[in-house]
Amino acid sequence: MKVVTLAIAVLVAGCANKQSPAAANSSLVKFQQKSEEISEREQKCIKAANLLIDDQRLHNSADPDSTNNAWTLKAKDERDRELTACTTTADREKKELAASTRAEYQAALEEERDRATLMSILSTSQQH
């Protein structure tokens, strides 16, 4: 009975969720896709900020009472704030994605190390 239990434990430890190269590639593809999504959102944000400034410029040019120079400075400041917000958000999301991916890989490494330790213990105990 002890030998059967030990054999089952070895089988379970050897077959348990071992990350295959395909799974590693899948993780890399997922990371790349999420990174591209973040970059696309950043580019959309930048385009939206520039469109907003262009719309304001058109509105301002139609108003003969406006002071063009003051408006230009204000518009540039506003655009710069919007662009900074876009890049800051994208940078934060990329850092979060990288941290999450590192944590996933670290967990997989620890799981693999634990599995190897268990296999070592089980194979050593079989010899006795």
Image: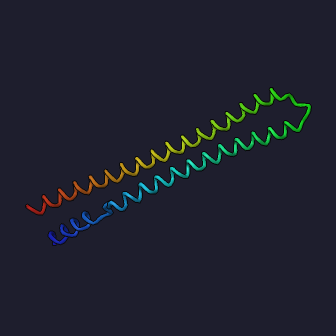
Residue 28 quadrant: bottom left
- Viewer-proximal residue, 13 or 68? 68
Asked if residue 53 lies left or right of residue 28, the reply is right
Q: Quadrant of the C terminus?
A: bottom left
Identify the residue shown where x is 57% and y is 43%. 90
Q: Residue furthest right?
A: 65
> Is 24 on the left-hand or right-hand side of 2?
right
Q: How is the image coloured?
A: rainbow
Instruction: Where is residue 82? Give x, y as percent.
Output: 67, 38
Q: Position of residue 8 (x, y in %)?
A: 22, 69
Q: Quadrant of the N terminus?
A: bottom left
Left or right side of 101 for 115? left
Residue at 31% from the left image edge and 51% from the top image edge = 110
Is 58 placed above or below 101 here?
above
Q: Is residue 119 left or right of residue 95?
A: left
From this view, report whether residue 8 is shown above or below residue 108. Answer: below
Q: In front here: 25 or 47?
A: 47
Q: Residue at x 33, y 63 (%)?
A: 17
Name the residue nearer the viewer: 104 or 37. 37
Q: Residue 58, how many percent across, how many down?
A: 82, 40
What is the total number of numbered labels drawn onto the structure image? 0
Near-viewer residue (77 or 118): 77
Residue, x 44% and y 56% (percent of image)? 29
